Image (cartoon, rainbow, N blue to C red):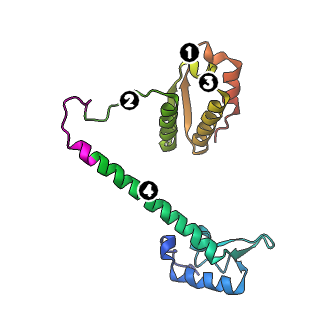
Amino acid sequence: MNRPPHPEHSAEELCAAGTKLYGQALREGLMSSAEVQAAPCLVDFGLLQPSVSELNMLEPVAPSTALYRMLRGAAERVADERRRQRLAGTFDALMEINSHRTGAEKTPAVEVLSGINRINLAITQAMAEASSRLLAIHPHISHTQAPPERHREAMARDQELLDRGGRIRALYQHTVRHLPSMLARYGELVPL
C-alpha cells in the first residue's frame, strides 16, 4: 500500500499527522521508524531523534527544547529581515542622490577588491555559490607568504566544492606549481 507523499510545510505549521504522532510520542515514549512514516517532518524538524538506548527507535525531544530551537530560528529570520529593511532604507535615501561622480551603474564583470579579509570573503561567497567548477589565477605571494590558517580556510573551501561534485582548475606561475608544498596541498584534497 503506497502512502500519499507527505505535504511540504514549515516547522511553524506542523501537519495534523505530525502533531498527532508527536503527541503520541510524548505520551508513550519511544516510537519505531515505521510508526513515523506518516510524518517524516518530525525527524526533519528535530521533534523526534534517534534513541541513545535503543538505536532502531526514535524518542521525542522535549517540547520546551523543540520550541526554543524553532523560536531561535524564527528570531534569526526576523533579525535578518530587519537588517535587510534597514539596509534598504539606508540605500533608498542614497539612491535618490543622482550624482555624476559615481562609477558605472551596471555591475562590472570585474570588480577590484583590496584587503585580505575582503578578498577572502568574496572567494568564500563565490565558492559557496559555485556548483560545477572553480577557475582561479593565483599570484606567487598567495602560496609562499600566506599564514598557515589562511591555507586551512582555503583547503576547507576547496574540499567543500569537491564534495559537491565540483572541479578546481588553478593557474600558478610556472615555478610555484612545482613546489613540494603546492604538490602536497593538492595531494590532500579528495575529489568526489
Q: Amino acid at mark 2?
A: Glu
- Distance from the alpha carbon under mark 4 to that under mark 1: 42 Å
The residue at which mark 1 appears reads as 173
- In the rendering, which numbered label is found on residue 146? 3
Position of the N terminus, as image quadrant, is bottom right
Which secondary structure class fits the magenta region best? loop
- Dot 4, crowdedness within 10 Å: few (<14), some or many (≥20)? few
Of pointers 4 and 1, the one earlier in the residue sequence: 4
Asked if residue 158 lies in the magenta stretch, the reply is no
- Whether residue 47 appears in this view of the structure is no
Q: Amino acid at mark 1?
A: Gln
Of pointers 3 and 4, the one earlier in the residue sequence: 4
- Distance from the alpha carbon under mark 2 to that under mark 3: 22 Å
Secondary structure state at the residue bearing disc 4 = helix
The part of the image, by quadrant, that contains residue 157 is top right
Q: Position of residue 69 (x, y in %)?
A: 58, 67
- Residue 175 or residue 28, whichever sits in front: 28
Q: Amino acid at mark 3?
A: Ala
The residue at which mark 4 appears reads as 80
